[in-house]
Image (spheres, coloured by chain):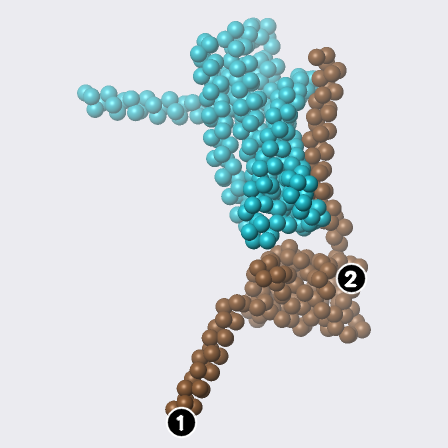
Chain colours: A cyan, B brown
């Protein structure tokens, strides 16, 4: 009997896991279907870009600058032993544009914007606001969820681009202004080796994919939350964990796809 | 905040993002030098291309004048077929020669073009006849060891006499 109970528990767990995947998939598909309706009321989307993008700008810029500073310092210490300090800008540029820009921005985005989305939707649900909307024949998916989704997807690549750009400027400040490397070498090696389509373009594609994942996860967790204070707290935590892990996993796959050929 | 204020802020945010994209592609990448690149293609055959890669620079007198477009193997002669694109405003004599060179001790490999004396100029699709392959370090070391061994054999045989 014990054995059978254990078996049943494992089975129930599997079924629950598969079902939650299915629910998330259906939710995402539903979200995509409601995008046109939300685009027709673009004012709502603009509002969300402000809430998601503009208000995340400060933390993204500050982090980008700090990452640029630190990256330039560390790379300088490593490169100076080989007498290759002129490639400092190139290395900082490539690592920011290809990897650090999209990934760190996505992690910060999940922490700054994702959690607020989850909490907002979760509290709306707890306060029965979503049901009230349905009662008034207003579809909360096209009025509440889809504008937030579009806002997140538009904001994320812009934030990642700004992160990389200010990181490179930070590296310029440390490398050229403080350490005293040659400014001409700093820029010309970048221009010679960094490809717009391959490096910058793929970085933007990455950040777009991360934007879709982070926003969709945040909205789903908010929508599925239990309508209690603990439920909202739990959903917020799960947003950060799930979106961070999926960003890191997705990043590995995208890197393998994009940069596998030299 | 009023609706106008929010729209203003979002507009600024989007413009800032576009300015960042412009900075990344013009200042910190190769878009500026990418567009004006219009040239004619020339083919060269090499016994060994070494570590040459597509998009490697083509230089003459150290000045970059083009890029390697593609590298394939000629199925009949088993030679490396290097297609390169040279800027339109640079014309070379027909009997110019191409070498695969290395920038610095550990640097990337590039193609060095040396102008010949022919009065006709290389046109699109022409083949550069005179080529010099990349130096493969292993072959060089092998040759050196072989020479050393040959020298040692000679001296020991003279000692015996």
**Compared with residue A41, is residue B139 higher up or lower down, i.e. above or below?**
below
Instruction: Rate crowding at label 1 as few (under 14), some (14 to 19) or many (20 or more) other CA atoms within 10 Å.
Output: few
Question: How much space separates mark 2 and mark 1, taking CA atoms?
Answer: 63 Å
Quadrant where the N terminus of chain A lies? Answer: top left
Query: Which residue is nearer to you in this view: A196 or A44?
Result: A196
Q: Measuring from the top left, give residue A125's x and y in whole percent.
A: 51, 10
Q: Which disc, if any, is residue B161?
A: 1
Q: Secondary structure at mark 1?
A: loop
One can see residue B158 in this view: yes
Q: Which disc, if any, is residue A54?
A: none
Q: Measuring from the top left, give residue A64's x and y in whole percent.
A: 61, 32
Q: Measuring from the top left, give residue A130's x and y in whole percent.
A: 55, 10
Q: Measuring from the top left, give residue B160's x and y in whole percent.
A: 38, 91
Residue at the spot 63% in from the left edge and 65% down from the top edge: B101
Q: Where is mark 2, residue-wise?
A: B90
**Residue, far bottom:** B161
Q: Residue A40, located in which quarter of the rendered image?
A: top right
Instruction: Rate crowding at label 2 as few (under 14), some (14 to 19) or many (20 or more) other CA atoms within 10 Å.
Output: few
One can see residue A199 in this view: no
Q: Secondary structure at mark 2?
A: loop
Query: Which one is in front in this view, the residue at disc 2 or the one at disc 1?
Result: 1
């Amino acid at each position: 009997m014990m054995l059978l109970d254990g078996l049943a528990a494992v089975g129930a767990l599997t079924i629950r896991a598969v079902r939650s995947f299915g629910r998330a998939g259906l939710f995402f598909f539903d979200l995509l279907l409601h995008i046109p309706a939300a685009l027709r009321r673009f004012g709502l989307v603009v509002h969300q870009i402000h809430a998601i993008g503009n208000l995340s700008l400060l933390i993204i810029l500050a982090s980008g600058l700090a990452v640029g500073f630190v990256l330039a310092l560390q790379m300088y210490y490593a490169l100076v032993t080989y007498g290759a300090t002129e490639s400092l800008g190139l290395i900082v540029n490539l690592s920011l544009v290809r990897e650090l820009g999209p990934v760190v921005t996505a992690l910060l985005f999940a922490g700054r914007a994702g959690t607020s989305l989850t909490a907002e939707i979760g509290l709306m649900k707890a306060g029965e606001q979503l049901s009230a909307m349905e009662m008034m024949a207003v579809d909360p998916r096209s009025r509440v969820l889809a504008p937030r989704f579009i806002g997140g997807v538009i904001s994320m690549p812009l934030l990642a681009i700004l992160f990389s750009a200010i990181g490179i400027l930070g590296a310029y400040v440390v490398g050229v202004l403080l350490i005293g490397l040659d400014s001409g070498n700093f820029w010309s090696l970048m221009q010679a080796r960094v490809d717009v389509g391959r490096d910058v373009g793929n970085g933007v594609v990455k950040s777009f994919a991360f934007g879709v994942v982070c926003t969709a996860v945040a909205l789903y967790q908010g929508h599925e939350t239990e309508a209690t204070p603990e439920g909202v707290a739990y959903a917020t935590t799960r947003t950060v964990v799930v979106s961070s892990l999926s960003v890191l996993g997705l990043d590995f796959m995208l890197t393998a796809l994009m940069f596998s050929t030299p | 905040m009023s609706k106008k204020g929010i729209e203003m802020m979002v507009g600024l945010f989007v413009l800032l993002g576009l300015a960042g994209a412009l900075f990344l592609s013009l200042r910190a990448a190769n878009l500026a030098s990418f567009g004006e690149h219009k040239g004619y293609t020339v083919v060269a055959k090499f016994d060994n291309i070494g570590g040459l890669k597509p998009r490697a620079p083509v230089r003459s007198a150290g000045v970059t004048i083009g890029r390697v477009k593609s590298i394939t193997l000629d199925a009949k002669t088993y030679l490396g077929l290097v297609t390169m694109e040279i800027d339109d405003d640079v014309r070379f004599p027909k009997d110019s020669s191409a070498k695969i060179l290395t920038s610095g001790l550990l640097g990337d490999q590039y193609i060095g073009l040396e102008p010949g004396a022919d009065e006709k100029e290389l046109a699109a699709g022409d083949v550069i006849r005179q080529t010099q392959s990349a130096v493969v370090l292993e072959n060089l070391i092998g040759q050196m060891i072989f020479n050393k061994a040959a020298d040692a054999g000679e001296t020991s045989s003279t000692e015996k006499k």
